[in-house]
Amino acid sequence: MTTAVEQLELELQQQLGRVLFGLEQAIHGLCVALVAQGHVLLEGPPGLGKTLLAKSLAEMLEGEFKRIQCTADMMPSDLTGIHVFDKQSNGFRLLPGPLFADVVLVDEINRTGPKTQSSLLQAMEEGSITLDRKTYELPTDFLLLASQNPFDFEGVYPLPESQLDRFLLRLQIGYPDIDTEMKVLCHYDMPGGGHLDHHAKVTALPENLLASARQQVSAVHVSAGLYRYVAEIAKASRSEPRLSLGLSTRGALALMRCARVEAACHGRDYVVPDDVKDIAPTITAHRLVLTPEASLEGIDCVQIYNDIAATVPTPRD
C-alpha cells in the first residue's frame, strides 16, 4: 500500500514533471523539504527553470507566491515591508513586503549585500518578522526558496554562515543532457516560454496529503545508534583541518529530520544508515566552511563530507 509520503512524492514528480524536465532529483529534494518544513537553496546558472519550479510548487500548495529579484542596492525594507502613516486611523499601519507570502522565491540571493541578506534570518528561523519592535507572524507553512549564482560570477556576495545554516538543504541544478534539453525546446518553443504556457498546468495536492505525510514521518523510528552516528559525523567535521567551520547542531538536527523523510519515501517506518548517507550531501555541504587554503585549492565540500563520513563507523543495530 502506498504511504502518504510516497503518494506526496509521486504527486510532485508527476505534476511538476509536466512543466519541468530532468529535475527529478531536485523535486525529490523539494518533497523532503516540504515534509521536514525547511527552506531550500537552489544553486546553479540562470535560465534553468528555478523560478518556474518555485511558481509551480506554489500552485500545487495553493499558496500565495512572491518573487524577490535581489540587487546590490536592495534594502531590508524591500523584503520585510514598512510602516506607513494612515490618516484615517491616525496611526501607523504595516505595508507588508513580499516575505508575507506562503512561498517566496529570493532570486539571485547572493547579488544583494549582507545587511539585506540578514533581514531573512528571523523569517527563516522563527517564521516571523519584527518591525519597529512589533512582531508579525508569517503564514503557517511559510517556505523560502532562494536561488544562488556560482561564486565565480561577477557581482555576487558570499552568504553569511548563519544564513547558510538556516537552509535545510541545497539542491544543485545543472545543465540538462541533450535529450532533456530537446524536450524543453520542443515544449516551450513559443512566445513567453514556460511562464505563459497554458497547456501544461499543475493541479493542487490532494487535501490533507501534506499533513498526513508529516504525521507519518513523525512516527518513523530512529535508533540510539543512528543518533550517535550523526553526532559523531558532526563532531568529526569540527576537527577537520580543511574546514574553518564544521557541522552545527542545527545541521545535525536537519540531517536527522531529512533522514526520517528519506526512510518514509522508501516505505519504511524506521531509519537505516543508508538514509543518512543518501541525503547527507544536500544537507551538510553548504554548511561546511572551507579554510582559505582549501578554498584556493578548489576543494569540494561534498568530497570533504564524504571523507569525514568514511572515518565514522556505520552502526549495525
Image (cartoon, rainbow, N blue to C red):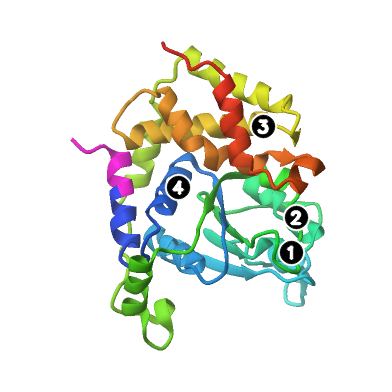
In front of the other: 177 or 77: 177
Q: Is residue 308 left or right of residue 14?
A: right
Asked if 45 appears above or below 307 in the picture, the reply is: below
Task: Using the numbered discs, state the Cα–Cα distance from disc 4 to disc 3 in whole angstroms.
Answer: 20 Å
Mark whose residue sits in front, 4 or 1? 1
Badge 1 crowding class, 10 Å Cα cut-off, few under 14, some 14 to 19, many 20 or more, is some
**SS majority, magenta:** helix
* Disc 1 and disc 2 in contact, CB within 8 angstroms: yes
Q: Point out which mark residue 156 bears.
A: 1
Which image quarter is the N terminus in?
top left
In front of the other: 35 or 282: 282
Look at label 1 and name its amino acid: Val
Residue 233 at x, y percent in the picture: 60, 24
Badge 2 crowding class, 10 Å Cα cut-off, few under 14, some 14 to 19, many 20 or more, is some
Look at label 3 and name its amino acid: Leu
Residue 65 at x, y percent in the picture: 51, 66
Q: Point out which mark residue 247 bears.
A: 3
- The residue beneath circle 4 is 29
Return the disc, 2 or 3, that comes first in the chain's sequence.
Answer: 2
Look at label 2 and name its amino acid: Pro
Return the disc, 2 or 4, that comes first in the chain's sequence.
Answer: 4
Callout 2: helix, strand or loop? loop
Give the magenta-colored segment's residue range: 1-9
Residue 174 at x, y percent in the picture: 50, 60
Task: Using the numbered discs, state the Cα–Cα distance from disc 1 to disc 2 in whole angstroms.
Answer: 7 Å
Q: Is residue 19 visible?
A: no
Q: Residue at x 73, y 53 (%)?
A: 159
- The residue beneath circle 2 is 158
Asked if 73 appears above or below 12 in the picture, the reply is: below
Q: Residue at x 36, y 23 (%)?
A: 270
Look at label 4 and name its amino acid: Gly
Badge 3 crowding class, 10 Å Cα cut-off, few under 14, some 14 to 19, many 20 or more, is many
